[in-house]
Image (cartoon, grey):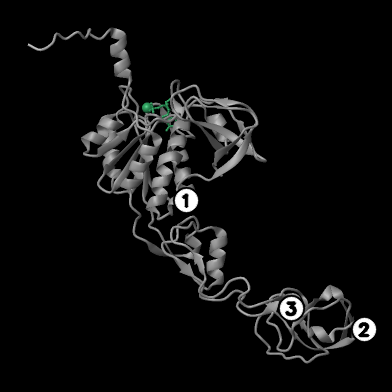
Amino acid sequence: MGLADTRQPATPNERRRKKRKPIVITEEKALAHILESVAPLPSRSVPLAQAREQFAARDVFARLALPVFDNSAMDGYAVVAKACAAGKSQRVIGEQPAGADRKLRIAPGEAVRIFTGAPMPAGADAVVMQEEVRCEGPEIFVETKVEPGDFIRRRGSDLSEGQRILASGERIRPQTLALLAAQGFAEVEVGGAVRAAIIVTGDELIPPGGALETGQIFESNSILARALFEKCGVSVAQVEHCADEASSIEAALRRSFACDVLVVIGGVSVGARDLVKSALNSVGAQTDLWRVSVKPGKPFLFGRAGACAIFGLPGNPVSAFVTFLLFVRPAVLQLMGAHRDELSLPRIDATLTEEVRNKGDRPHYVRGRVLHGKFTVVGRQESHALYGLSRANALLRVPPGEVFRRETVVPVLSLD
Ligand code: AMP
Ligand code: MG
């Protein structure tokens, strides 16, 4: 016989507390696991017009110096600077517009009428703006001091041949595209095209445009998720709406597993009508993690079916929004070949216009608006409160137990 067991049987209260205490992992651990689970998709070459918001799949180097040739920065006259002393006339011997090089040549005391972007005539070492010149027939009088180099854009002064213009994993912005075009590239190699699927679940959901009966609401999460995917540079391949019914959810899941990323919204919590977790199980998908210590968004789920990364987001719109940005977006960007530094939302410093505190035990992503460097909380901070979310352009992460005083400068996550 061993020692007598002195433990008392659990009281009903203790039993309830135990039952209520699920295994919840930190957001850092959840994100690390998700990022380990998704690898960049194979790269592809796309026309520049399709490359915005994609990520460079390799370094790109300048194949041309920019400017490509010495040219005029102004509409005016190409001259020899030292011949332009006050009162001396210059004889205009020709005209050089932007376009074909007329191969003109000038000697001191001569000038060529020239326009912005036109190649410099041989012999000229400066351009005088037309506003600084008085014309008298074929002669001009320069009414300003002229230095060699004035208003000439020198070949290679902006960019040298061979210089790196794009790094692997870097986001391609409109201005990046302009540079690639100026280099004569018609295409660019970018990370893989992510195929995304969305499933929304709920008996109460009616597509916008229809008529509501008591107890029903308009479905808004699929439009939200689609827009968030598109903001990542991903076009959504399929969107489905399922009733809270195992067979319909299972069928939709099976149809979606051909995609790289599946977002299932609603039905991932602990209610009897939250069927997503069991449906995933029934169709052979694995659930890697469920419930993350964030507010809003605790019931978040991540799993896999073959090569498909599955994200279960809570149905409350603010929870769906926050968990998409915290977990889905970084995974999607990684699939697209983004550099690590690009995965989180941009951080900016802002001064709090009011005190913000978190009395809870999870990090709270507070929705607010940044204007001229000041952050103001907007709307009700509850996970169903869509109006406040619609006004928000930033999230403030408030750690558990934290009190941020008014006028404190805090880093906020920009949503724009
Ligand atoms: P659930 O996560 O399914 O328990 O849903 C939580 C809350 O979010 C409920 O009030 C749902 O009515 C609401 N909800 C779920 N899915 C959507 C959706 N697609 N659009 C709008 N509200 C939703
Ligand atoms: Mg539901």
Mark 2 residue element: loop
Q: Is residue 351 left or right of residue 145?
A: left
182 over 376 or under it: above or below: below
Residue 23 visible to an observer of this rendering: yes
> Residue flagged by tag 3: what amino acid is it?
Gly
Q: Quadrant of ligand 1?
A: top left
Return the disc, 1 or 2, that comes first in the chain's sequence.
2
213 over 81 or under it: above or below: above
Is 147 or 389 nearer to us in this picture? 147
Where is residue 140? Give x, y as percent: 87, 84
Is 21 or 386 nearer to us in this picture? 21
Q: Is residue 67 left or right of residue 342?
A: right
Spatial CA distance of label 1 from label 2 is 59 Å
Estimate how packed mark 2 is, as few (under 14), some (14 to 19) or many (20 or more) residues with alpha carbons within 10 Å. few
Residue position marked by numbered label 1 in the rendering: 342
> Residue flagged by tag 2: what amino acid is it?
Gly
Q: Nearer the viewer, mark 3 or mark 1?
A: 3
Of all residues, the one furthest to the front in this rendering is 3
Mark 3 residue element: loop
Spatial CA distance of label 2 from label 3 is 21 Å
Q: Is residue 165 left or right of residue 300?
A: right
Where is residue 57? Give x, y as percent: 41, 62
Query: Mark 3 vs ligand 1: CB under 8 Å?
Result: no
- Say the numbered circle drawn on residue 330: none
> Residue flagged by tag 1: what amino acid is it?
Glu
Return the disc, 3 or 1, that comes first in the chain's sequence.
3
Where is residue 372? Give x, y as percent: 67, 41
Residue depicted at 21% across the width and 34% down the height: 282
340 over 367 or under it: above or below: below
Residue position marked by numbered label 2 in the rendering: 87
Spatial CA distance of label 3 from label 1 is 41 Å
